[in-house]
Image (cartoon, helix red, strand yellow):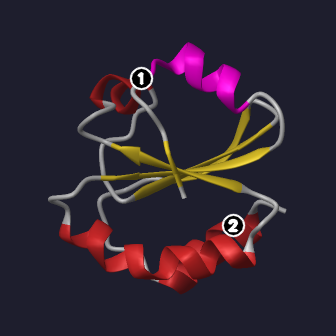
């Protein structure tokens, strides 16, 4: 999974302007993020039409605030620069919940 460098919302919109992207907001200190991380390679493989981007919430605190990401782990989907869905809350997420979210986007 590619790690997103520190950027603002305008730069992010440019980066995700073409294609399908799934942003995965997390932080090293977050136990619920560590819970879902082992499942991420499998989820990425299953949904290869998306480019997955790991966003370190602490490194990108301004971007997270601009996007109203107030709980992690969180997922935000983009298609051709437009947000098409989000799974944003502070709850622990299972592999099944993440897959259900991605399936609901189609």
Q: Quadrant of residue 16?
A: top right
Secondary-structure class at tag 2: helix
The answer to whether 8 appears left or right of 26 in the picture is right
Q: Quadrant of the N terminus?
A: bottom right
Crowdedness near tag 2: few (<14), some (14–19) or many (≥20) residues, C-alpha within 10 Å: many
Q: Tell me if residue 47 comes above or below residue 22 in the rendering.
A: below
What residue is drawn where x is 58% and y is 14%? 10
In the rendered structure, does residue 8 fall within the stretch colored magenta? yes
Q: Is residue 93 above or below residue 16?
A: below
Within 10 Å of disc 1 (Cα), the crowding (few <14, some 14-19, many 20+) is few
Q: Quadrant of residue 64?
A: top left
Q: In the image, 100: left or right of 88? A: right
Task: Say left or right for 81 vs 43.
Answer: right
Residue at the image point whose x is 74% and y is 57% from the top: 50
Asked whether 19 or 64 is in front, the reply is 19
Q: Main secondary structure of the magenta part?
A: helix
Q: Nearer the viewer, residue 14 or 76?
A: 14
Residue closest to the eye, 31 or 5: 5
Q: Which residue is mark 2?
A: 102
Q: Is residue 100 magenta?
A: no
Earlier in the chain: of badge 1 and badge 2, it is 1
**Residue at screen point 36% across, 59% down:** 73
Taking the spot 53% from the left edge, 78% from the top edge, the residue there is: 97
Residue 30, quarter of the rendered image:
bottom left
Indicate the secondary structure of the residue bearing disc 1.
helix
Q: Which residue is mark 1?
A: 66
Question: Bounds of the magenta span?
Answer: 7-16
Position of 46 relative to 65 (above/below)? below
CA separation, marks 1 and 2? Answer: 23 Å
- Compared to residue 89, the image places residue 37 above or below, namely below
């Amino acid at each position: 999974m590619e790690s997103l460098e520190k950027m603002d919302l305008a730069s992010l919109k440019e980066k995700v302007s073409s294609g399908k992207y799934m942003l995965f907001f997390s932080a090293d200190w977050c136990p619920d993020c560590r819970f879902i991380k082992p499942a991420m390679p499998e989820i990425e493989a299953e949904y290869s039409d998306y480019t997955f981007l790991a966003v370190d919430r602490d490194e990108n605190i301004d971007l997270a605030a601009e996007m109203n990401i107030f709980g992690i782990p969180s997922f935000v989907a983009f298609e051709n620069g437009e947000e098409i869905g989000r799974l944003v809350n502070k709850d622990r997420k299972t592999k099944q919940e993440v897959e259900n979210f991605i399936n609901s986007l189609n």
